[in-house]
Image (cartoon, rainbow, N blue to C red):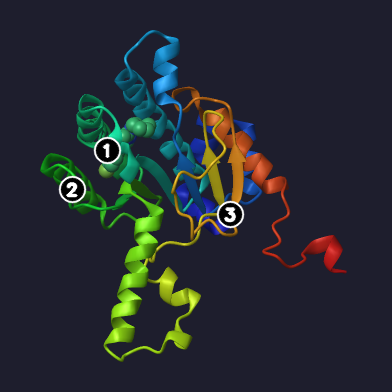
Amino acid sequence: MFNKLLKRNIEPIIVEYGERAMAVAGAGVPSHVAIIMDGNGRWAKKRSMPRVAGHHEGMKTVRKITKLSSHLGVDVLTLYAFSTENWKRPKMEVDFLMRLPEEFLSNFLPELIEENVRVEMMGYVDNLPAHTIQAVQKAKEATKHNTGLVLNFALNYGSRAEIVDAVKNLASLVQAGELEPEDISEEMITGRLMTKELPEPDLLIRTSGEVRLSNFMLWQLAYTEFWFTDTLWPDFNEDCLLEAFEVYQKRNRRYGGLKGEEAN
Ligand code: V07
């Protein structure tokens, strides 16, 4: 933990975010944080602005939260940017959303490189517009040797479809006579998900008062701590992230067994 902080350079945390961030960094930050970035449309509506103005504002929050997560020593930040269900929205809104990866990266890719962040994406690439895929591909390529925070965008991602695909793959092995049904294990499913290279999330955050998973990482979140806030994503800031981490640090994670006091 301490080594990790030394490697990431402790100084910017104190200077930019103060003592509170320092205390959070020292107490063990979650390794993998997943966020459902909800409330962008509502943020805009409150201001009589079009929904897309909220999405655009939400991009600025992505930048802030990525930067602080990186400085605190988070290993993986997974952000739910677009779900497989989001195609049902008005075409104009979908088109706008599909331009956001390009806009985000044209503004912030140099900063991500500077911060040693590695950009990743999980989701169904097939039905994404070519311009969106190209922008993400370029960012992945430009950051592939970076060793700091993994910034993993869930883009056209759906958890049930992901699990169905893993099951189909196992079924084909069974059909080919290469696998016995009784030999199917949790690890074989985990290893066929889009997150197979990543640790399981330690903390899930959902903003804007909705308290559900909306088809996000259903398998991966089995032991994850959940934290919900009424704050809308464009209003979510460094203090909100620190609060979430403080709550996480106070919780006693048990994984179904007993730890600490009750184990004695
Ligand atoms: C999107 C902004 C954040 C609030 C939630 C919805 C709107 C950043 C990206 C992005 C994706 C891939 C990538 C780089 C950036 C993004 C979409 C929507 C579709 F490589 N924000 N953001 N993508 N919103």
- The kind of residue on which mark 3 rests is Thr
Q: Answer yes or no: is residue 21 visible.
A: no
Q: CA distance from mark 3 to mark 1?
A: 28 Å
Q: Which mark is residue 1?
A: none
Q: Which mark is residue 87?
A: 1
Q: Are marks 2 and 1 in contact (CB under 8 Å)?
A: yes
Q: Is mark 2 within 8 Å of ligand 1?
A: no
Residue furthest toward the right?
264
- Where does the C terminus fall, quadrant-wise? bottom right
Q: CA distance from mark 2 to mark 1?
A: 10 Å
Q: Which mark is residue 224?
A: 3
Q: CA distance from mark 3 to mark 2?
A: 30 Å
Q: Are marks 3 and 2 in contact (CB under 8 Å)?
A: no
Q: Which mark is residue 127?
A: 2
Q: Answer yes or no: is residue 250 visible.
A: yes
| Foreground tag (3 vs 1) | 1
SS at circle 3: loop
Position in image of residue 185 (x %, y %): 48, 79
With 215 as the anchor, is 249 left or right in this view?
right
* Earlier sequence position, callout 2 versus callout 1: 1
Position in image of residue 177 (x %, y %): 30, 91
With 117 as the anchor, is 261 left or right in this view?
right
Position in image of residue 213 (x %, y %): 50, 45
Q: Are marks 3 and 1 in contact (CB under 8 Å)?
A: no
- The kind of residue on which mark 2 rests is Asn
Task: Tell me what residue is drawn at x 35 percent, y 60 percent.
Answer: 162
